[in-house]
Image (tube, rainbow, N blue to C red):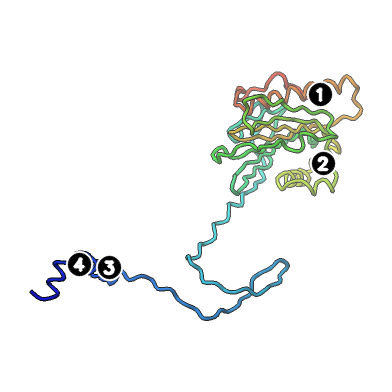
């Protein structure tokens, strides 16, 4: 027997090393590893800075392939409606219900908000003899968006200049997204400086009313209502003509009407209003 054969029989550790070396060599031949690229220098390239300035920083090799930018969110749309059908009573909106005070209302602007949380806006108006006698603006996330309410109440809930306001008390066990409040405030839609602060849907609606020759009262009463929970949120704004020469008794009746209206909108958030029926509590405008 040769010397190699005797070593093979008497040295099992050496035999194992030889077999391992042969196996690893075969694997390396079949699956060659990526060798590092050594660089003996670097070049500098400009990096952007705020204000359009630039500075030089060492260029580095990327370890991963660049990821394409995400597609931009849907930008949304806004549509002005002309000769829309008459609407009254209770109407569906974004999975909720909106009560319409007495009279004939027409859709004027419908908007869809794009982005991470898509939403809906709808503006309805009531006119009589070329005069705007009412406007309702509703806004809510789309029912399929899965959006929840905010963790904090909207700032307007504590508006110090409100004529009247109310905030639902927080109850133990409520969702941290459960909020409800409303205010009654004076609004001026004819002031050009205030129009500049309106969102695109409301601004477009007022521009369309001007085009139609509809006269907008100089002062209007605004009832702003907000409610949210873990299933979403609803914001409504109701504008009615303001009568500055009303008596104290009439003022109390208006405030009582606003409280009833807020209660009805609360029910509409839960979808508990009879479709098409005008609640008796708001069957007439406040006087």
* Spatial separation of the CA atoms under disc 4 and disc 1: 99 Å
Quarter in which the N terminus is drawn = bottom left
Q: Could you tell which of marks 4 and 1 lies nearer the N-terminus?
A: 4
Q: Residue at x 58, y 79 (%)?
A: 43
Q: Could you tell which of marks 3 and 2 lies nearer the N-terminus?
A: 3
Identify residue for label 1: 255
Identify residue for label 3: 24
Quarter in which the C terminus is drawn = top right
Identify the residue at the far bottom of this view.
40
- The secondary element bearing badge 2 is classed as loop
In this view of the protein, which residue sits in the foreground, 5 or 230?
5
Residue 48 position by quadrant: bottom right
Identify residue for label 2: 189
Q: Callout 3 environment at 10 Å: few (<14), some (14 to 19), or many (20+)?
A: few
- The secondary element bearing badge 3 is classed as helix
* Spatial separation of the CA atoms under disc 2 and disc 4: 95 Å
In this view of the protein, which residue sits in the foreground, 33 or 15?
15
Q: Which of label 3 and label 2 is nearer to you? A: 3
| 222 w.r.t. 1: above or below | above
* Residue 114 screen position, x and y as percent: 60, 48
Residues under numbered marks 4 and 3 in contact, where contact means CB atoms less than 8 Å apart: no
The answer to whether 145 appears left or right of 181 in the picture is left
Disc marking residue 15: 4
Residue 142 position by quadrant: top right
Q: Could you tell which of marks 2 and 1 lies nearer the N-terminus?
A: 2
């Amino acid at each position: 027997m040769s010397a190699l054969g005797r070593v093979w029989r008497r040295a099992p550790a050496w035999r194992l090393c030889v077999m391992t070396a042969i196996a690893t060599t075969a694997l390396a031949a079949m699956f060659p590893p990526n060798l590092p690229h050594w660089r003996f220098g670097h070049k500098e390239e400009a990096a952007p800075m705020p204000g359009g300035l630039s500075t030089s920083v060492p260029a580095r090799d990327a370890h991963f392939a660049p990821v394409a930018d995400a597609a931009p969110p849907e930008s949304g749309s806004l549509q002005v409606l002309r000769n829309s059908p008459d609407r009254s009573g209770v109407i569906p909106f974004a999975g909720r219900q909106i009560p319409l005070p007495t009279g004939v209302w027409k859709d004027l602007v419908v908007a869809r908000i794009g982005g991470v949380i898509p939403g809906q806006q709808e503006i309805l108006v009531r006119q009589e003899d070329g005069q705007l006698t009412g406007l309702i603006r509703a806004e809510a996330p789309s029912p399929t968006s899965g959006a929840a309410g905010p963790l904090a109440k909207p700032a307007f809930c504590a508006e110090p200049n409100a004529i009247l306001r109310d905030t639902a008390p927080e109850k133990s066990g409520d969702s941290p997204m459960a909020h409800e409040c409303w205010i009654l405030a004076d609004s001026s839609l004819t002031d050009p400086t205030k129009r500049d602060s309106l969102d695109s849907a409301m601004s477009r609606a007022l521009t369309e009313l001007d085009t139609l020759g509809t006269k907008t009262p100089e002062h209007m009463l605004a009832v702003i209502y907000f409610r949210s929970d873990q299933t979403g949120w609803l914001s409504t704004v109701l504008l009615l003509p303001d009568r500055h020469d009303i008596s104290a008794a009439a003022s109390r009746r208006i405030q009582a009407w606003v409280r009833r209206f807020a209660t009805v909108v609360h029910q509409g958030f839960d979808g508990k209003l009879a479709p098409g029926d005008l609640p008796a509590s708001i069957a007439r405008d406040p006087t």
